[in-house]
Amino acid sequence: MIGFKAGLVLGIASVAAMILRRRSAAWRHAALALGFGVVGALPVLELAAPGWGATVAPSFVGISAAASADVRIVQLLWYGGALLGVLNIFVGLMRIAWIRAAARVVDARRHAIADDAAVEFGLRRGVIVLETDRPVMPVTWGLFRPKILLPDAACEWSDDCLRAVFRHELAHVQRGDWAVQLLATLITRLFWFNPLVWLASRQLRLESERACDDAVLNLGVEGTDYAAHLIHVARAAAGRHARIGLAPAAARARGLERRIAATLDARVDRTPLSGFACVIAAVLFVAAALPIAGFGQPPASGSPALLGVQREVLRRFGGEERKFSIVAGDISFWKNKLEGRVELQARLNVDGSVSGLRIVEPVHPDLATAAEVIVRNWRREPARVRGVAVEVPIRMTVDFRR
């Protein structure tokens, strides 16, 4: 259920981003980031949201209570894929740490340019600028002590090119994009089976890059000059087969053309998102997501709604079978000296009857036939939850003794 809700929330966020296509990239990124934030908070929102949902039939309750093999296989596939995805994130973070350990601080000239750019963005946190011999794109990571990593070829870049790169990367720092993208990546790995989550994560990254491009252009940089710097950095990285994906990158190969086109288009809205507008958008988005979070949850009232009954059956019985034992007497074939125990699985219906009989272990055919006859004629009070009869799985043993 939570996978369905996550896809629905991110689907709404993606639609909101499409509606905002004529607004700035910062607005579209905020819509998608709020979507991922709501998905991350779904377990909490489910507790706070009022429960609602369609009435669930008793037969569906019985089916849900059974732990079928197919459901278990699907769950194992989900958990296995999610585990591999989280391990992939962990490996990526370890790779960043490894490159960080081998990197070195840049010279005073480049650090001075970075410090000036940090002042332009009003950043008070110290930003560490490093360089590495490995072929990487300029990347930024870190929450409390942000770091910018450059390839060693950056020592040959002009001051204007370095200033454009630093401004772009520091715009990521100011916006907190690394933490947002890390959360989105984690959610994408947990819900790896949902294509809507992957599409939203990809769009989030692209809008993040475009929003940072807009932040640089808003400082008075000419679009043609900035586009030339983007192409220069991308060509230098392509020539060295740079690895992309450690963190939000200064240029993405797939989105570079769209970014350059947006940079050169004077009609594009580049309005930054104010703090007040962000708060209002967050409130509206959470308000819209609350009904989604509350779907399938038990209603707040104490009425014995069948949806609440279903949840209680799953909690109290959890697919475990209730066990009963019958001792048979006066069986005509005892003259053949047949004795033994027959184990059966079945379902105790809401009317007290038994259906879906199945012999668990192989036994003598006569014993199996007699056990089925006994159980089919057996009646018992049905299981009840909050006074409502429910269907539950049971396991029965029939002992044939002389």
Image (cartoon, rainbow, N blue to C red):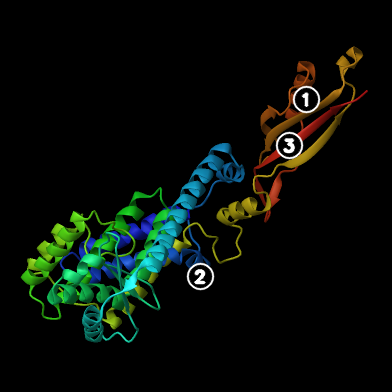
Element type where label 2 sits in the image:
helix
Task: Say which label, 3 or 1, has the lower sequence index.
Answer: 1
Distance between the alpha carbons at the discs numbered 2 and 3: 38 Å
- Label 2 is placed on what type of residue? Ala
Mark 2 and mark 3 lie on one chain; the one further toward the N terminus is: 2
Which quarter of the figure has residue 274? bottom left
Q: Where residue 222 sits in the image (x, y, percent)?
A: 7, 75
* Disc sitting over residue 395 in the figure: 3
Q: Which mark is residue 321?
A: none
Q: What residue occupies the far top of the structure in this picture?
A: 336
User: What x and y, as percent, mark residue 376?
Assistant: 73, 28
First reached walking from the N terminus: tag 1 or tag 2 = 2
Q: Residue at x 45, y 62 (%)?
A: 293
**Camera-nearest residue between 137 and 384:** 137
Question: Which class describes the residues within 10 Å of circle 2: few (<14), some (14-19), or many (20+)?
Answer: few
Write down the residue under mark 2: 48
Amino acid at dot 1: Ala
Gap in angstroms between the C-alphas marked 1 and 2? 50 Å
CA distance for labels 3 and 1: 13 Å
Label 1: which residue? 371
Residue at 68 percent across and 49 percent down: it is 317
The residue drawn where x is 55% and y is 44% is: 60
Q: Residues within 10 Å of mark 1 (few under 14, many from 20)?
A: many
* Front one among 185 and 313: 185
* Rendering coords of residue 9 (x, y %): 37, 60
